[in-house]
């Protein structure tokens, strides 16, 4: 029985000694890591990562995809920002179109009356200044008599038999259309020859 107790004590001592040795080894390892510079740590990491293993290839693939996705998002946001800046005045200009329509109507009905001649000249000058100011922001009128009918720019509100013009031409402009740079704000309402 004394032998068994002695063996148990010896085994416990060996276990404590093994534990102490493991702790000392861990402490020595941590001290060695703490003593390394950042460059040495990076070099050790590169040595330990196996470039030929699947884990590394998958991680690199995920990283490259994430970088590509980030680049695409940046480009898309830049395009959207440029588009927004380019057409920032669209709403304001669209709200001003009825004013242009009323100036056109005033000229249409007042130009034939001799009593309104001077007022019509003033309205015409005001309309021209207004159109010039809007043109500096990219607004231009679309839909003139004699243009070829284009459904992308014109809205046909009627057909007219006319032997003097080819078929499919704008015979009369009922309401002028407007375009902001390449974007159509409002199509021109026209009567088309048959």
Image: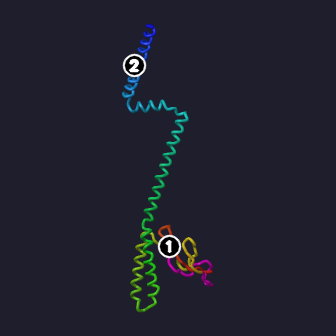
How far across and how far down the image is residue 170, in percent?
A: 57, 79
Of marks 2 and 1, the one in the foreground: 2
**The magenta stretch spans residue 50:** no
The quadrant of the picture occupied by the C terminus is: bottom right
The quadrant of the picture occupied by the N terminus is: top left
In three-dimensional space, the C-alpha distance between marks 2 and 1, rounded to whole angstroms, equals 86 Å
Above or below: residue 41 compared with residue 111: above
Q: Residue at x 44, y 64 (%)?
A: 86
Above or below: residue 9 compared with residue 188: above
How far across and how far down the image is residue 31, in percent?
A: 37, 25
What is the number of the mark on residue 20? 2
Q: Residue at x 50, y 73 (%)?
A: 186
Crowding at mark 1 (Cα within 10 Å: few <14, some 14-19, many 20+): some
Crowding at mark 2 (Cα within 10 Å: few <14, some 14-19, many 20+): few
Magenta segment: 159-178
Q: Nearer the viewer, residue 63 or 194?
A: 63
Residue underneath mark 1? 186
Left or right of residue 62: residue 12: left
Q: Residue furthest front?
A: 1
Q: Residue at x 41, y 92 (%)?
A: 115
């Amino acid at each position: 029985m004394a032998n068994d107790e002695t063996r148990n004590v010896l085994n416990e001592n060996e276990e404590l000694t093994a534990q102490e040795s493991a702790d000392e080894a861990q402490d020595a390892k941590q001290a060695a890591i703490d003593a390394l510079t950042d460059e040495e740590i990076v070099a050790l990491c590169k040595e330990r990562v196996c470039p030929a293993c699947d884990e590394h290839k998958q991680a690199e693939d995920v990283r490259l995809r994430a970088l590509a996705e980030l680049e695409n998002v940046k480009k898309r946001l830049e395009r959207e920002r440029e588009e927004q800046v380019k057409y920032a005045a669209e709403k304001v200009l669209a709200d001003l179109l009825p004013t242009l329509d009323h100036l056109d109507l005033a000229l249409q009905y007042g130009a034939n009356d001799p009593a309104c001649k001077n007022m019509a000249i003033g309205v015409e000058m005001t309309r021209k200044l207004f159109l010039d100011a809007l043109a500096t922001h990219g607004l231009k009128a679309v839909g003139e008599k004699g243009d070829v009918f284009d459904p992308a720019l014109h809205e046909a509100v009627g057909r007219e038999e006319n032997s003097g013009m080819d078929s499919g031409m704008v015979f009369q402009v009922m309401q002028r259309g407007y375009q902001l740079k390449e974007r159509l704000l409002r199509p021109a309402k026209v009567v088309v020859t048959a």
